[in-house]
Amino acid sequence: MNPLDITRAAISNTFRSKTRTALTVTAIVIGAFTLTITSAIGTGVSTYIDNQISSVAAPDSLSITKASDAAPGSQSAPAPYDPDSAVVGGGFEGDGSEFSSGILTAADVDAIADVDGVLEVNPILRLDPLYIEHDGTGKYELAINVNIQMINPDLAAGTPMPEGGNHVLLTSAYLESLGFPDAESAVGQPVSIGIADHSGEIHEREATISGVQNETLFDSGIGLNQTLSDALREAQAIGSPADTEVGFFLATARFDPGIGEEALSALKADLAELGYNAMTAADQIGIFQSIIGGIIGVLNAFAVIALIAAGFGIVNTLLMSVQERTREIGLMKAMGMGGGRIYTLFSVEAVFIGLLGSVIGALGAMGAGAVANVILAETVIADLQGLEVLVFAPIPMITVVLLVMGIAFLAGTIPARRAARQNPITALRYE
């Protein structure tokens, strides 16, 4: 028998006992389905995280603060503005410990600039705008994205902020609160931003919405262009005493992107010794990658366990097939068919069962994943635009199919060897 004949015979023999084969294939389908789904989740989430990292800070930038207790995450809708809880004046007392990050002073900026490896330090002045409002729909607290000048925002509509004029870049979390039905309708609309000076008097500055950014895994907020930031800062400083300490929310430090991981770690350590936290964009989101990787690993382990259990089903199916075909095996040997070809025949049967189960499982996972993506996009992850939870990439899917076929081949080894070692005379006498 040539290889083609062996393949045809193996496929034909697989369906001799349809019920037994169907049950074995079903077990493989369950394992392959689970492994394909978990692989797709890993691919989808990893792709989203990689896109988030690539869209934020430049690879030669460190974000430096005194302390950081806030964890990055998705943003909720803005809270209504409460005049009684407003911060006024822009100054601060003490060491800034009342904020989620300690306030950096001019002395801190000088200390950071003196660290070996730091090429440039850009301190970001703290702004405390009170509210944002559009067309009398109500005043809402606003969070400022202090890193907006350092990123390439993922826009749902509109364009990045121009340099001239007062412009803001909303996040989608503000749309409903400000009375916009969708991102497109918000572009070009005016908003008012209120900020208090040192005496508590509120000043409003008008701005135009240039675009709306999608929610990301990073801490986000409304972006202000430089012209609007300067206008708000001037209003905030009205009435400030000459000796009011200037506070910086954070500072960004540039370093040589070619220094390597070891030198970068040393730079972070030097800053840590001075009491500063320094993180790249990859550092800020690294915890997400670790957690997701661990979860995917556990799910994959359960899928492999299911496949191993299915492997025992293949062993049982083929052992029963060997027993039922004992006389047939003896006849093939009597006609000159060697043990190697008989071994190959049963091995091909095992691999075909694995192929059949893995393909059905993978196709079923793709169908279920397509439905799940639509449901998740409209419910659970509606605020994380651009996230497709299940991504069925060709290479991971082919890997799953090959893995299942490999397990099936190993499972078929014992029955195949047993068939190959049959004594033809004894086999012909078997009843």
Image (cartoon, helix red, strand yellow):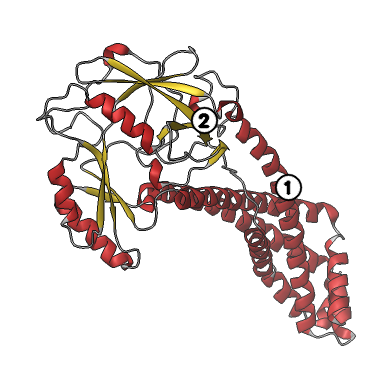
The percent coordinates of residue 232 (x first, y second) are: 32, 28
> Mark 2, mark 1: which one is toward the viewer?
2
Using the image as rendered, state which of residue 14 and residue 87 is in the foreground.
87
Report the residue marked by disc 1.
364
Using the image as rendered, state which of residue 234 and residue 104 is in the foreground.
234
Q: Residues at badges 2 and 1 in contact (C-beta under 8 Å)?
A: no
**Looking at the figure, which quarter contains the N terminus?**
bottom right
User: Which residue lies at the image location 39% right of the left edge and 53% below the top edge?
Assistant: 282
Q: Which comes before the other along the chain, label 2 or label 1?
A: 2
> Quadrant of residue 231 in the image?
top left
Could you say which disc has been placed on residue 107 in the image?
none
The percent coordinates of residue 188 (x first, y second) are: 55, 28
Q: Residue furthest toward the left?
A: 243
Q: Amino acid at mark 2?
A: Ser
Q: Secondary structure at mark 1?
A: helix
User: Which residue lies at the image location 52% right of the left edge and 30% below the top edge?
Assistant: 172
Could you say which disc has been placed on residue 172 in the image?
2
Q: Secondary structure at mark 2?
A: helix
